[in-house]
Image (cartoon, helix red, strand yellow):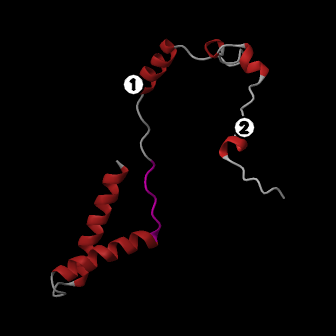
Amino acid sequence: MSSKRKTPARTKTTRATSPVASAQPESAVSAPAAVEMPSAAVERAAERASAGAPKAAPPRPRLSREERHGLIAKVAYGYAERAGFRNNPVEDWLNAEREVDARLERLAS
């Protein structure tokens, strides 16, 4: 092994340019002929057409019976907890059912 230490000047390499890149100035490089770039007028027309179109409603949230039951149970427990567990649990459950169903209807519309 050589005892000479490599300095940054010795390890520096020059970047070779390709003959194709040096043959054309950078301003002359364009998109390939097979790819057509849409004109600005076409893009604006497409934007206007999509902006005026009615947007599709988000899909209605589909809950399984178990998921709905779990939501109702959480809301009913909240009602009971706020009342210090002194209310009728059936009334809490029925109120929670109404609230959950109303929330789901609002989300669906």
- Amino acid type of the residue that numbered disc 1 sits on in the rendered structure: Gly
Q: Where residue 41 is drawn, which disc sits there?
A: none
Q: Earlier in the sequence, mark 1 or mark 2?
A: 2
* Distance in Å between CA atoms under marks 1 and 2: 57 Å
Please give the name of the residue rendered at 17% of the width and 79% of the height, measured from the top-left corner. 82
Q: Quadrant of residue 68?
A: bottom left
Reply above or below: 96 against 53: below
Q: Is residue 106 left or right of residue 61?
A: left
Q: Which residues are magenta?
A: 59-65
From this viewpoint, which residue is outermost toward the front?
3
Q: Is residue 36 left or right of residue 73?
A: right
Please give the name of the residue rendered at 34% of the width and 53% of the height, measured from the top-left corner. 107
Reply above or below: 2 against 56: below
- Amino acid type of the residue that numbered disc 2 sits on in the rendered structure: Thr
Q: Secondary structure at mark 2?
A: loop
- Whether residues under marks 1 and 2 lie with C-beta atoms below 8 angstroms apart, the answer is no
Mark 2 = which residue?
Answer: 13
Q: Is residue 15 left or right of residue 107?
A: right
From the viewer's side, name the closer residue of 45 and 75: 45
Reply above or below: 49 against 57: above
- Counting from the top left corner in percent of width and height, residue 74 is at 32, 75
Mark 1 = which residue?
Answer: 52
Q: Is residue 22 left or right of residue 61?
A: right
Q: Is residue 8 magenta?
A: no
- Counting from the top left corner in percent of width and height, residue 48 is at 42, 20
Q: Residues within 10 Å of mark 1 (few under 14, many from 20)?
A: few
From the viewer's side, name the closer residue of 51 and 54: 51
Magenta segment's dominant SS is: loop
Q: Quadrant of the N terminus?
A: bottom right
Reply above or below: 105 against 57: below
Q: Secondary structure at mark 1?
A: helix
